[in-house]
Amino acid sequence: MQEHLADAVVDLEVRSAYQDRVIADLDALVVRGFATRLDTAERELRQLREALRSPDLPSGPANEPPPHY
């Protein structure tokens, strides 16, 4: 009976260690993915802000010729 209990405890410890590793790996994957998307969003936001500050660049239909041209 005591050996069975010891085996069960070892099994639980192995499962717990495996789950801890999987959770850490998944967390790292999520963090990397989020960081990449955040970097992309920040870069695009910077580009938009620069485009809005620069009056030389046409933006929108107000600067496009009418369709009959």
Image: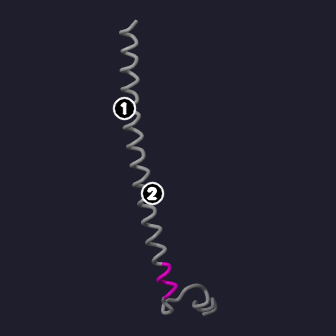
Dot 1: element: helix
Question: Where in the figure is residue 13, as x and y percent of width and height?
Answer: 37, 26
Q: Is residue 45 left or right of residue 62?
A: left
**Residue farthest front in this picture:** 2
At horizontal 58% and vertical 89% (from top left) the residue drawn is 64
Q: Earlier along the polypeptide chain: callout 1 or callout 2? A: 1
Of the numbered discs in the image, which one, if any, rests on residue 31? none
In the depicted view, which residue is nearer to us: 51 or 68? 51
Dot 2: element: helix
Please check the rendered image and state whether residue 52 is part of the magenta-colored stretch, yes or no: yes
Q: On screen, 28 above or below 38?
A: above
Question: Where in the figure is residue 6, as x and y percent of width and height?
Answer: 36, 14
Q: Amino acid at mark 2?
A: Phe
At horizontal 50% and vertical 80% (from top left) the residue drawn is 49
Q: CA distance from mark 1 to mark 2?
A: 26 Å
Question: Where in the figure is residue 11, as x and y percent of width and height?
Answer: 38, 21
Please check the rendered image and state whether residue 7 is part of the magenta-colored stretch, yes or no: no
Of the numbered discs in the image, which one, if any, rests on residue 17? 1
Q: On screen, 17 above or below 47?
A: above
**Image quarter of the C terminus:** bottom right
> Which residues, given as a range, are shown in magenta?
48-53
Magenta segment's dominant SS is: helix
Question: Where in the figure is residue 51, as x and y percent of width and height?
Answer: 49, 84
- Label 2: which residue? 34
At horizontal 44% and vertical 50% (from top left) the residue drawn is 30
Q: Nearer the viewer, mark 1 or mark 2?
A: 1
So how many labels did they put on this image? 2
Q: Amino acid at mark 1?
A: Ala
Q: On screen, 16 above or below 11?
A: below
At horizontal 40% and vertical 30% (from top left) the residue drawn is 16
